Image (cartoon, rainbow, N blue to C red):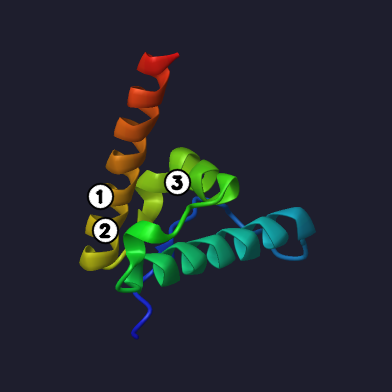
Amino acid sequence: MKSENQIHQNIIKFPGSDNKAVDEQTKEFARLIKSISIKMSKSDFDQHILSHKELSLLSNHGEAIELAPLIAARLNSVLATSLIRNSLLEDLI
């Protein structure tokens, strides 16, 4: 599977300066994006639950994440299903 995921950043790296926190965050974002892509590329994508960290990443940085069209479409479907399910559960309470 060709990896078409990219993280766009507006972080300027100055020569001689290292920010380990930013490096770790970038690695964590890449790991989470890969996890989401793997879940959404499986045939039973609708059975895989997105973790709180994955949802937080999508909530905060979703507009800057590029996913393959099939992965993005499946992710939209899973998120919409979750919203409907949560809405129905709230109505019952």
Helix, strand or loop at label 2? It is: helix
Q: Count neighbours of disc 1 (C-alpha within 10 A) and say few if under 14, some if 14 to 19, many if 20 or more.
A: some
Identity of the residue drawn at 32% across and 49% down: 78
Direction from residue 21 to residue 91 in the image, left or right: left
The residue to which callout 3 is attached is 58
Is 12 in front, or is 59?
A: 59
From the viewer's perspective, tell me whether residue 29 is left or right of residue 1. Answer: right
Amino acid marked by disc 1? Ser
Q: Which residue is depicted at the point 46% across and 45% down?
A: 61
CA gap, disc 2 and disc 1: 5 Å
Of 33 and 93, the residue lying toward us:
93
**Mark nearer the N terminus (3 vs 1):** 3
Residue at horizontal 52 percent and vertical 51 percent from the top? 54
Q: In the image, is 28 to the left or to the right of 8?
A: right
Asked whether 19 or 47 is in front, the reply is 47
Residue 67 position within the rendered picture, expressed as x and y whole percent measured from the top left: 32, 63
Please, what is the three-letter code of the amino acid marked with disc 2?
A: Arg
Q: Which mark is residue 77?
A: 1
Callout 2 crowding tier (Cα within 10 Å): few <14, some 14–19, many ≥20: some
Q: Of the residues shown, which amino acid type is indicated by label 3?
A: Leu
Q: Which numbered disc, 2 or 3, marks the residue closer to the eye?
A: 2
How far apart in space, not on screen, are marks 3 and 1 (Cα)? 14 Å
Relative height, residue 32 to residue 4 (above, below): above
Mark 2 highlights which residue? 74
Contact between marks 2 and 1 (CB within 8 A): the answer is: yes
Q: Nearer the viewer, mark 3 or mark 1?
A: 1
Does label 2 or label 3 sit earlier along the sequence?
3
- Quadrant showing the N terminus: bottom left
Q: Is 81 drawn above or below residue 24 in the view shown?
A: above
